Amino acid sequence: MAHTNILLREDVDDLGARGEIVRVRAGYARNYLLPRKLAVEATTSNVKQIEQERAALLKKEAKERTTAEGQAAQMGSLVLEFKRKAGEQGALYGSVTSMDIAEALKERGYEVDRHRLHLREPIKRLGDFTVPLRLHREVSIYLKVNVAPEGEVIVGHLTPEQEAELAKQAQGAPQEDSAEAAE
């Protein structure tokens, strides 16, 4: 298989950071990285040019990180609530996707690319969830997402507090019954 060395102009997940020289397959470089201006060929002139730009890149990187940290501090206490139709067992008729979460963030004034939300699969149940959000290569936070039933409370769906109360009652009830039966 043909490989080539390229110089990354932007951070690429699972490949490398800006300014690094990496070895990739020629087709990946030719069809994906080069057309999207994520990388350039690692020629001596390009390497020299990037070394000259490195100071500016470091300043830009520091600025991006501080803005990401500031945004993370603002979003730390944020709770996103979604109302969806659900069945009796708490299963949703549909789902909450990363696109829905990105739109909810946009409504609150945060511009976040949905690809930065690392939601393994869409949320398909009622309840509270945490969704990882990668704001920067070194800055990640966990968003709190609450999925509640739309309209009236559906029979069979309980809040975590109600479930805990029922569990306490269920544990206490058989013990009292067995004590009465023993008399």
Image: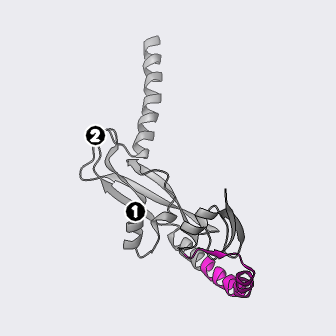
- On residue 131, which mark appears? none
Task: Tell me the kind of residue under disc 1.
Answer: Met
Give the image location of residue 61, x and y in percent.
Answer: 65, 80
Q: Which of the 4 image quarters holds residue 102? A: bottom left
Note whether residue 95 is visible: yes
Task: Tell me the kind of residue under disc 2.
Answer: Val
Mark nearest the camera among 1 and 2 is 1
Asked if residue 41 lies left or right of residue 171, the reply is: right
Mark 1: secondary structure: helix
Question: Seen from this angle, which residue lies furthest left?
Answer: 151
Residue hosting label 2: 155
Q: Residues within 10 Å of mark 2 (few under 14, many from 20)?
A: few
Q: Which of the 4 image quarters holds residue 73? A: bottom right
Residue hosting label 1: 99
Is 42 covered by the magenta stretch? Answer: yes
Q: Residues within 10 Å of mark 1 (few under 14, many from 20)?
A: some
Q: Which of the 4 image quarters holds residue 136? A: bottom right
Q: Residue at x 40, y 72 (%)?
A: 106
Give the image location of residue 99, x and y in percent.
Answer: 40, 62
Q: Quadrant of the N terminus?
A: bottom right
The answer to the question of whether label 1 and label 2 lie on touching residues, with beta carbons closer than 8 A, is no
Q: Decide whether the magenta segment is chiefly helix, strand or loop.
A: helix
Q: Residue at x 75, y 81 (%)?
A: 44
Closest to the observer: 34 or 154? Answer: 34
Tell me where the magenta segment starts and ends, as one range: 37-66
Q: Is residue 103 above or below residue 119?
A: below
Give the image location of residue 121, x and y in percent.
Answer: 45, 50
Q: Residue at x 45, y 74 (%)?
A: 110
Is 131 covered by the magenta stretch? Answer: no
Give the image location of residue 123, x and y in percent.
Answer: 41, 50
Q: Give the mark nearest the N terminus, 1 or 2.
A: 1
Asked if residue 111 lies left or right of residue 88, the reply is: right
